[in-house]
Image: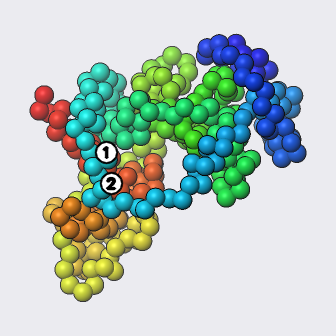
């Protein structure tokens, strides 16, 4: 057990070497944060002070999050990143390896196995790319040294400290992305505390090393965000007339129902009940513009990552996974 783990009163999942004390986070702003955690959440100030002596400011994290966004890829370039033969084949292998767990998750939460597998495939290539930064470093760096999103990351740092206390794990041992997303499903600490589940019943939640807990946690996330078992996700549409562009959804929130969309010149390949709240969007496909209508389940996928193209990639990968699985 590391000295920091002992100071926080948590059991380390494995012994780790003591890092060189960085002294990056011992100033006034950190002292104010520690005071808040002590006052509001019952932490001992000396314990948190000991932890932050080991937290390191990572310039690489600030560079990554501050880097000007690359040109937003059109769908015809974005889709091939995720819909690949390798991702499909390895997804089928992951599905086969965890078939019983996926079937149980689908039965308990109503989320199809292929959707769960697809999320893990898109996020971390089935656990191969889960991130190499210590979560404490990522969240300290962004919470104290990145003003544009400091409130968000400061909140995630709070959630992380609560998480390690609740789960009795070593705060210096957990790793994730440069933004602090963790494990096979890349949950932020707040999502972990709200949606992660102990799906194998061993008394602890481990989304870093335990695919069973990761699978159950993804299904839990989708269920609690409103996934409806048996309902479609998205359907192809055709548009006509002069008013169809008025039907395009701005952002991700549904503002029209299917009946209103039909009146503006939208027709779908399969029937959508007129009262269904929908997301209508256009993508630049390889063969020209594509028009799509997303059901409420499509909106649920965008709660995982607030991007229409992300949700489409997850959905289409899930379709290809199901097809490949059925062919074997």
Which numbered dot is residue 144?
none
Viewport quadrant of the N terminus: top right
Q: Position of residue 126 (x, y in %)?
A: 37, 31
- Looking at the image, which is closer to me, 136 or 8? 136
Q: Position of residue 10 (x, y in %)?
A: 71, 20
Q: Quadrant of residue 3?
A: top right
- Tag 2: Cα neighbours inside 10 Å, few (<14), some, or many (≥20)? some
Q: Is residue 302 left or right of residue 138?
A: left
Question: Which residue: 41% across, 61% down?
Answer: 72
Q: Is residue 83 left or right of residue 125?
A: left
Question: Which residue: 30% across, 59% down?
Answer: 75
- Looking at the image, which is closer to me, 265 or 50? 50
In this rendering, the answer to whether 220 lies above or below 238 is: above
Residue at the outermost left position? 327
Can the viewer see residue 275 in this picture?
Answer: no
In this rendering, the answer to whether 20 lies above or below 15 is: below
Question: Which residue: 65% across, 13% down?
Answer: 15
Q: What residue is disc 1 on?
A: 82
Q: What residue is disc 2 on?
A: 78
Can the viewer see residue 62 in this picture?
Answer: yes
Question: Which residue: 81% across, 33% down?
Answer: 23
Colouring method of the image: rainbow
Are circles 1 and 2 on residues that touch, CB within 8 Å? yes
Kindly state the secondary structure of the residue where label 2 is placed: helix
- Looking at the image, which is closer to me, 253 or 209? 209
In this rendering, the answer to whether 322 lies above or below 227 is: above
Viewport quadrant of the C terminus: top left
Kindly state the secondary structure of the residue where label 1 is placed: helix
Q: Is residue 169 left or right of residue 258?
A: right
Q: Quadrant of residue 105?
A: top left
């Amino acid at each position: 057990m590391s000295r920091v783990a002992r100071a926080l009163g948590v059991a380390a999942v494995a012994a780790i070497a003591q890092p060189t004390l960085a002294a990056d986070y011992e100033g006034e702003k950190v002292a104010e944060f520690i005071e808040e955690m002590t006052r509001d959440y019952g932490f001992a100030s000396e314990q948190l002070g000991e932890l932050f002596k080991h937290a390191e400011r990572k310039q690489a994290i600030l560079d990554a999050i501050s880097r000007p966004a690359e040109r937003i890829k059109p769908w015809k370039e974005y889709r091939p990143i995720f819909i690949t033969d390798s991702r499909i084949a390895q997804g089928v292998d992951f599905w086969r390896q965890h078939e019983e767990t996926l079937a149980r998750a689908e039965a308990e939460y109503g989320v199809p196995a292929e959707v769960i597998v697809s999320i893990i495939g898109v996020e971390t290539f089935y656990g191969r790319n889960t991130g190499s930064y210590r979560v404490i470093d990522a969240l300290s760096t962004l919470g104290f040294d990145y003003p544009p999103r400091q409130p968000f990351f400061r909140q995630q740092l709070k959630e992380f400290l609560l998480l390690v206390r609740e789960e009795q794990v070593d705060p210096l041992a957990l790793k994730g992305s440069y933004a602090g997303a963790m494990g096979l499903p890349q949950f932020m600490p707040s999502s972990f505390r709200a949606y992660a589940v102990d799906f194998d019943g061993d008394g602890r939640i481990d989304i870093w090393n335990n695919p069973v807990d990761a699978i159950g946690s993804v299904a839990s996330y989708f269920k609690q965000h409103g996934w409806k078992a048996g309902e479609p996700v998205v359907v192809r549409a055709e548009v006509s007339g002069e008013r169809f562009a008025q039907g395009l959804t701005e952002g991700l929130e549904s503002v029209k129902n299917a009946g209103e969309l039909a009146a503006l010149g939208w027709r779908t390949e399969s029937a959508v009940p007129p009262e269904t709240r929908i997301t209508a969007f256009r993508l630049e496909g390889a063969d020209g513009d594509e028009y799509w209508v997303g059901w409420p389940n499509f909106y649920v996928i965008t709660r995982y990552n607030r991007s229409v193209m992300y949700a489409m990639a997850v959905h289409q990968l899930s379709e290809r996974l199901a097809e490949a699985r059925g062919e074997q």
